[in-house]
Image: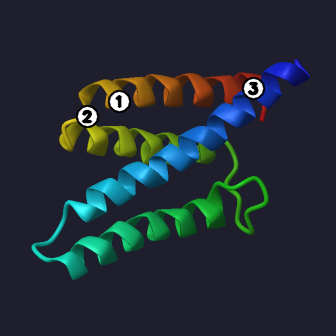
């Protein structure tokens, strides 16, 4: 059981990093000049990271309980997948969405 928890924790961390990358890519696609591209590419994932850090991180100051935690994490991850799809990365979006669903359901089952 502990091995499965460790594997899922690693997957969840990788998904979190991928989520920030997807938000950054989408942020970069906004605007019409370099300044706006870069401000959005930094600002959007930073805003998501602040939300994640406050409410979803394992040591968050205001960590949500279940089922709110499950819903918030899943919405943020699936929104990242949708943004990947919107940016033209359909295969990556599908893989990301499936892995996010698997990881979230496993976290519930393993009580992580």
Which tag is nearer the camera, tag 3 or tag 2? 2
**Which residue does the numbered mark 2 point to in the structure image?**
89
- Quadrant location of residue 33? bottom left
Label 1 SS: helix
**Which residue does the numbered mark 1 point to in the structure image?**
92
Real-space CA distance between mark 3 and mark 2, rounded to the nearest whole angstrom = 26 Å
**Which residue does the numbered mark 3 point to in the structure image?**
7
Q: Going by the image, does 20 lie left or right of 63?
A: left
Label 3 SS: helix
Q: Quadrant of the N terminus?
A: top right
Query: What is the x, y in percent for residue 79?
Result: 36, 45
Which residue occupies 54% across, 64% down?
Answer: 49
Q: Going by the image, does 112 lie left or right of 36?
A: right
Relative height, residue 1 to residue 76 (above, below)? above
Which residue occupies 60% across, 40% down?
Answer: 14
Relative height, residue 25 to residue 44 (above, below)? above
Q: Going by the image, does 16 lie left or right of 35?
A: right
Q: Nearer the viewer, residue 44 or 51?
A: 44
Q: How is the image coloured?
A: rainbow
What is the residue that sits farthest to the front in this orientation? Answer: 34
Real-space CA distance between mark 1 and mark 2, rounded to the nearest whole angstrom = 5 Å
Q: Which mark is residue 28?
A: none
Sequence-wise first label, 3 or 2: 3
Q: Nearer the viewer, residue 78 or 68?
A: 78
Which residue occupies 44% across, 63% down?
Answer: 45
Q: Are marks 1 and 2 in contact (CB under 8 Å)?
A: yes
Sequence-wise first label, 1 or 3: 3
Query: What is the x, y in percent for residue 38?
Result: 30, 74
């Amino acid at each position: 059981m502990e091995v499965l928890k460790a594997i899922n924790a690693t997957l969840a961390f990788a998904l979190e990093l991928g989520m920030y990358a997807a938000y950054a890519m989408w942020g970069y696609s906004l605007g019409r000049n370099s300044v706006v591209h870069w401000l959005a590419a930094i600002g959007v994932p930073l805003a998501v990271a602040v939300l994640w850090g406050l409410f979803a991180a394992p040591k968050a100051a205001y960590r949500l309980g279940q089922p709110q935690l499950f819903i918030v994490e899943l919405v943020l991850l699936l929104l990242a997948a949708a943004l990947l799809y919107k940016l033209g990365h359909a295969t990556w979006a599908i893989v990301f969405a499936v892995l996010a669903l698997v990881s979230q359901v496993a976290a519930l089952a393993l009580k992580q």
